[in-house]
Amino acid sequence: MISLTIKKGYNLNVSGQPSSEVSDLKKPDRVALLPGRILFIKPKLLVKEGDEVNIGTPLFFDKRDDRIQFLSPGGGTVQKIHFGPRRVIQEIVIHLSDKEKKESFIAFSENQINAMDRTDLVKAILNGGLWHVLKALPFRDTAAPETIPPAIWVCLDNNEPFHPASHMYLDGKTGLFRFGLAVLKRLSESVCVSVATESPISDDKFMEMVTHQVSGPYPAHDPGVLVYHTKTHQLDNRSWSVTGQDLLLIAELLKTGVYPIERLITVAGSLAHKKYTARTRIGAPVAGLMPSEDHVAQARIVAGGVLSGYTVSHDSYVGFYETALTALPKGGEKEFLGFARPGIKKHSYSRTFLSVFNRKPLDMDCGMHGEERACVNCSSCANVCPVDILPQFTMKAIHAGEVEEALDHGLLDCVTCGLCSYVCPSKIELSTILENAKRDYYKESM
Amino acid sequence: MKALNTIFDSLRKYFEAGGRLEKLKPLFDATETFFFIPGDVTKEGPHIRDSLDLKRYMSIVIIAILPTFFWGIYNTGYQSIASTGSHVSFLTAIFKGLEIVLPMVIVSYGVGFFWETIFASVRKHNISEGFLVTGLLFPLILPPTISLWQVALGISFGVVIGKEIFGGTGKNFMNPALTGRAFLFFSYPVSMSGDSIWTVTKGTGAHVVDAISGATPLSLSALSGPGMDISSSLTHAGYSMMKLFTGLYPGCVGETSTLLCLVGAVILVVTGVANYRIILGGVMGLLGIGLLLNLFAGDGHSPWFSLNPVYHLVMGGFAFGIIYMATDPVSAPGMNSSRWIYGILIGALTMAIRVFNPAYPEGVMLAILFMNLLSPVIDHFVVDFRLTKRMPNV
Ligand code: SF4
Ligand code: SF4
């Protein structure tokens, strides 16, 4: 096992931490898939409103490769399909029936997996509708089934506030996890499993499977960061990644022949009434996880982490990949003589507030806390960047239209962690600028 | 506070597009955002943002400058009264100092702000907080005898030529306050150098008692002929190392006290607003060249060669320059290793100018300006070097 310490990054000490308890939620009455939240895909619907579907019935596929399908996480009727601007499919809502029917898929034993042809295995995952959980770096688009990646990274932890810790969802699933690794080993020569050094998992059987023990501030556990710090060859940049929970889904599908629907989702943030980790279903309604208490109405609900996530409305659903919901104060109050306050409770990467002496978690709202200005070259952004990009220079290259130069600067290594935008005193949207440039580059090369 | 907010809300309409005072929108915004951090919220990207903004950043710089500013007031007043031979009390020194320094500061801020507002309204961008620092630094690096019209001219040059023609704060590559000073230095050398400019004698009702009290340690040192020992002529003139360090002697308004510059440095470095690498590098460069010169000291060489280089740290504007001017992030390089190079070269150049070109005894300002010009170049090479070590990802 390799111990890896990632030095750069930053841990936000946000208030509203979840308790360590995992509660089982009762079955919701609806679940949904959110195609608009899945990067790059061009969804083509296979169902219409009113159709009966089972757990595992294909709802849509990706027009770019029709084998990549997305299956229904519930059995019942297609209640509503929401379209956004330009007819983007936003939500496919399934009203669940009391007794949900399940599609059945072929089940395999571990020995069968080990002896299987790669093509057949790929086909089984494709048919089971879970191929899309395999993502190809650096763009994190769905992996191309025929490609043999240099490595597949299984990143078990995520230290962006607040995500379920690996020991919570792996509890009692060592065997299933082993099965999942056997599957991945058929797809790539090299399978890396990373876990946080501080993880309480002590099971020896499990630890044997771990290849990298990683410590460091957010986003140390991001696959892009791990690849950046371990790569020995340029080809490694094209490694694949899968999260721990998603790998368990693949394992369950192939082992049992049933389309899996369970998800652990952390609900937290200073405005969440109850802060906990929920065992619920893929595509569960936000309202079921976070009841609409008064203070939730004043909150911004973020799906997928406070730095890299997106805003969801209270009547929406949790996206397939998201395992965190955070209720943050909306912010937006003007602050009188704000620049002159001692700031014992003002969170900051810098040492310009008295909060440097305050170790307590701090309330963080969605305010900008200042106006946009030109870059003053303070280099805070470069100091936090986990993959040694110099965001201020890369941003200037992008603005000047010098894509090649931005690429030389490591644009594709950017993991969109959002830290550079967080720290910038000039309030420049660095991570968005880099992310857009990276996506544009990808779309042009597609 | 609520009332103030209401006032701003009711006045805003005049400054919005189509309003009568539309052109003055940046002025309105600057005033409003001085009192209130705007309530904007994140739209995209990370949902939460650091509490630090440029206003806070620049306020810390101002706080760090204040000790030298107050000392400048006291010292200027003290020197002015002392030159008449009369007894100086603390209060009279302060009053006299305020009388001299405040008008300079007011003119510097007023005129500079005028230009900032004009450029901001033409370019339709906001007034940058960086100016609050420039406007305060500028009078502190001028001799107290300077005329107010020269202050106005200097700050105009600094803001317009040093900054705005490049596109404003963040796009300029020279420190505006230094640009203004350099302009005055070359256009009005008589007002900017010599022995008679460091103490205000006008209005004190007496003439200077002792001519030597008008000379600064640097000009005094530059006067020493071959074979003379600078440190003893300094001591002879009353400039002990301790006096030079604490700063009760004639000089530019804010520069004389190395001690208080150090206080500022502590504030800047502890808060992380200034990069310590530049300051340390500067000190190293200065001492390094100084020690090197010591090796060559002896007959036929200027007495500078044998001077203990520690004197250079406390004489003239070096401390002030390296702490407040060289660390201005906009005109300094952005990479840590470039910052070392930049600092070291400023120190070395300062020494070189002082020793080899006594016509400009105050080398630090020119050294910083020159290095301002070079800083993008240093960054360019350092970044390029770094990229050669980066495994490509395309
Ligand atoms: S450039 Fe910004 S968003 Fe990208 S990895 Fe670095 S800090 Fe994160
Ligand atoms: S943090 Fe912002 S102001 Fe500082 S160097 Fe980066 S982009 Fe420029």
Image (tube, coloured by chain):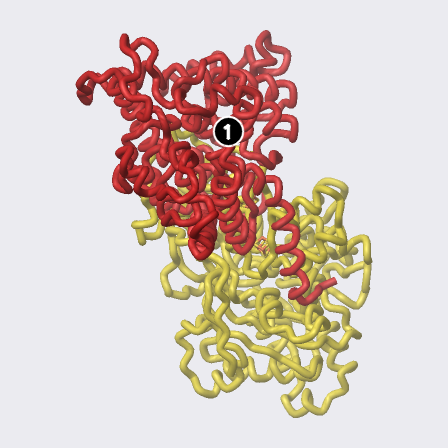
Chain colours: A yellow, B red
Vertical order, B238 against A109 (above or below): above
Residue B333 visible in the snapshot: yes
The residue under label 1 is B177
In percent of the image, x 27 and y 36: which residue is there? Answer: B236
Residue A202 at x, y percent in the picture: 40, 81
Q: Quadrant of the N terminus of chain B?
A: top left
Q: Secondary structure at mark 1?
A: helix
Q: Amino acid at mark 1?
A: Ala
A244 sits to left or right of B381 = left
- The chain identifier of the residue carrying mark 1 reads B
Q: Nearer the viewer, residue B84 or B8?
A: B84
Q: Position of residue B315 (x, y in %)?
A: 37, 38
> Relative to B120, is B275 above or below?
below
Q: Position of residue A113 (x, y in %)?
A: 68, 87
Where residue B313 sits, quadrant-wise, is: top left
Badge 1 crowding class, 10 Å Cα cut-off, few under 14, some 14 to 19, many 20 or more, is many
Label 1 lies in ligand 2 vicinity (Cβ under 8 Å): no
Q: Is residue B3 left or right of residue A319?
A: left
Of the four image quadrants, the one with ligand 1 is bottom right
